[in-house]
Image: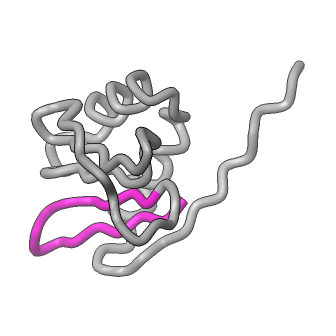
């Protein structure tokens, strides 16, 4: 997953899948919009991440069956390295 925090816009872009464009967008939270291509989530935009990332990302994850911890990890990494693209690879959990 690629993430980019634009400090001037105070927004994080989480690229879930590389595509040329999205078909539509779904506002899942007042600060989160999910871009869709063929009804698949391909990008998530989070506005004002300084107000917190957990709630909007967990709502998006629940609605689109995404990994909330991976989204939060990517957003946190983006905040730690503003105005640069970061890549986060989160492995699938192993069964205990």
Res 30 → quadrant: top left
Q: Position of residue 40 (x, y in %)?
A: 46, 42
Classify 95 as above or below 40: above
- What secondary structure do most residues of the magenta stretch adopt? strand
As for residue 50 lying within the magenta part, the answer is no
Residue 6 relative to residue 18: left or right? left
19 left or right of 50?
right
Residue 21 or 45: which is nearer the viewer? 21
Farthest right residue in view: 96
Residue at the (26%, 33%) spot, across then down = 56
- Residue name at image x 51 percent, y 34 percent: 66
For the C terminus, the quadrant is: top right
| Picture layout, residue 1 above or below residue 7 | above
What residue is drawn where x is 35% and y is 66%? Answer: 21
Residue 73 image offset from top left, x and y in percent: 49, 48
Question: How many marks can you see?
Answer: 0
Decide if residue 57 is on the left or right side of residue 87. left
Magenta range is 1-15
Image colouring: one colour
Quadrant of image for the N terminus: bottom right
Q: Where is residue 95? Give x, y as percent.
A: 87, 22
Q: Which residue appears farthest toward the top when viewing the image?
A: 96
The correct choice, above or below, for 60 with respect to 44 in the image is above
The residue drawn where x is 25% and y is 48% is 24
Q: Position of residue 70 (x, y in %)?
A: 54, 43
């Amino acid at each position: 997953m690629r993430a980019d925090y634009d400090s001037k816009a105070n927004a994080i872009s989480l690229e879930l899948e590389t595509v040329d464009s999205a078909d539509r967008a779904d506002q899942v939270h007042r600060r989160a919009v999910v871009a869709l291509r063929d009804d698949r989530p391909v990008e998530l935009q989070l506005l004002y991440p300084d107000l917190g990332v957990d709630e909007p990302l967990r709502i998006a994850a629940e609605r689109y069956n995404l990994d909330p911890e991976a989204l939060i990890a990517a957003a946190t990494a983006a905040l730690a390295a503003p105005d640069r693209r970061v890549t986060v690879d989160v492995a699938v959990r192993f069964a205990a």
